[in-house]
Image (cartoon, rainbow, N blue to C red):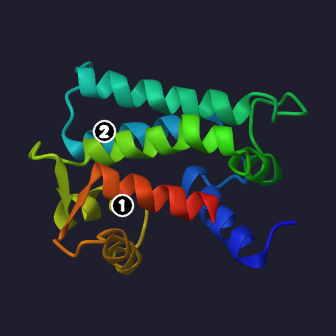
Amino acid sequence: MVTKAERDHFQTLFRRLDTDGDGEIAQVDLDHLVQTTLVRSGAAPGSERWRRITDLGNRLWDGLRAGLDTDQDGTVSAREFVTAYRRPEFLEQTVIPFETAVLEMSDEDGDGRVSVTEWLAWQQAKGVPVPDALREFTEIDADGDGYLGRDEYTRHLETQYKS
């Protein structure tokens, strides 16, 4: 049984991925999110970074769609979405690597960590309001140094998705 907090969390994630707001996630929604994030990060089209994140976005779509599109309409409904995100292997093998790779894309200066400015640019590309993005940054920044590292972010994702 899904708790109210889980339902709220999944609904928020679903709305972020449903970029056109039609109530379903299609590959075009994930493509839009990925490409918007790449453009915002300044990644050059066709670069290794561009291809890597695009590939991870395609894997996320394939993972969402695989076995979940019960009516074979080429989209994932909110109910199908919750089902996918509740599978631990989907989270571990697809979602967390994808989100971590996108985080790394937001590291514009290549120093191996993400500043609050870089974080805000990434979150705005995803449509997250600034106050929400700042609150999340503070929650993730466990050591309080004002930067997010890969390990710190991965621990946050594991806690967020598996709690």
> Is 63 left, or right, of 116 in this rendering?
right
Q: Which residue is mark 1?
A: 123
> Is 120 left, or right, of 84 in this rendering?
left
Residue 12 in view of the camera: yes
Q: Residue at x 24, y 72 (%)?
A: 143
Alpha carbon separation for disc pair 2 and 1: 12 Å
Dot 1 amino acid type: Gln
Quadrant where the C terminus sits is bottom right
Q: Nearer the viewer, residue 158 or 94?
A: 158
Dot 2 amino acid type: Leu
Q: Earlier in the sequence, mark 2 or mark 1?
A: 2
Quadrant where the N terminus sits is bottom right
Q: Is residue 69 above or below residue 106?
A: above
Q: Nearer the viewer, residue 152 or 109?
A: 152
Quadrant location of residue 133?
Answer: bottom left
Q: Which residue is mark 2?
A: 38
Pointer 1 local density, CA inside 10 Å: few below 14, some 14–19, many at least 20: many
Q: Position of residue 68 (x, y in %)?
A: 81, 35
Q: Residue at x 68, y 65 (%)?
A: 11
Q: Is residue 127 above or below residue 102?
A: below
Pointer 2 local density, CA inside 10 Å: few below 14, some 14–19, many at least 20: many
